Amino acid sequence: MTDTQTLVKELVNKHGNRRESLLPILQGIITNNRYISEYAMMEIANELDISRSEVYGTATFYSFLDTKPKGKYVIRVCKTITCSMKGKNQILLALEDCLKIKLNETTPDKKFTILETNCLGWCHKAPAMLINDDVFTELTPEMVHQIIEDYKKKGIQEKA
C-alpha cells in the first residue's frame, strides 16, 4: 500500500466514507502533502464510491485546495477592491522583487509560491496577505521585504 493510499484510508476512517466527508478528506491531504495529486483524488473517489470528476471538481473549486505542488511557503495576496485601492499592486511588486519570481510562480528552491486569492477577511486592515496560516495586514513594500527575509531565515534555522 502506498503512502497516499494509507493516508486516504486513515482520513476516511476519521471522517467517514460518505460524500459529506469529501471536503475534510481533501483538507487532510493538503495538511499532510501540501497539494492533492491526481493519484490521491483517484484513491478518494474509490474510497467514497463517487466519481473522479466529482472529487476533481471539488478539489479545483476551492482556492485553498491546491492540485499542483507549491512552495513550502504559499503566499496569498488578497485581490479584492479594498486591498487593490490600498496598495496590493505594490505588495505584489515587492514580493516579486524579493523572490525573483512572478505571480503564480514558485521559486526554483521550492520555498515560496506567490498567488492572488479572494477576500481574506481583513479589509479593515488592507492590504493583506497570508503566508501559509500567518496573516499579515496593513502592508507596505518595506514590511514585505522584512517578512520575506524573516521567512528565509526561518528556513535556514529549520535546517540547523
Image (spheres, rainbow, N blue to C red):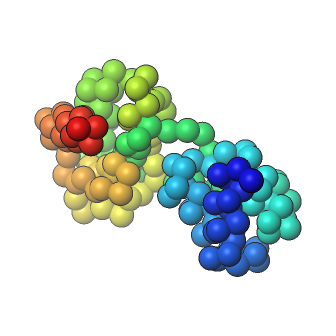
In depth, the one of 13 and 151 nearer the eye is 13
Q: Position of residue 115 (x, y in %)?
A: 44, 40
In depth, the one of 120 and 145 nearer the eye is 145
Give the quadrant of residue 11.
bottom right
Horizontally, residue 106 falls left or right of residue 144, namely: right
In depth, the one of 135 and 40 nearer the eye is 40
Q: Is residue 54 in sight in this rendering? A: no
Q: Is residue 59 above or below residue 20?
A: above
Q: Position of residue 113 (x, y in %)?
A: 42, 36
The residue lying at 46 percent from left, 49 percent from top is 117
Residue sticking out furthest to the front: 1
Q: Is residue 3 above or below residue 11?
A: above
Q: Point out the image quarter for the C terminus.
A: top left
Q: Is residue 80 above or below residue 123?
A: above
Horizontally, residue 53 falls left or right of residue 156, namely: right
Q: Is residue 107 above or below residue 44?
A: above
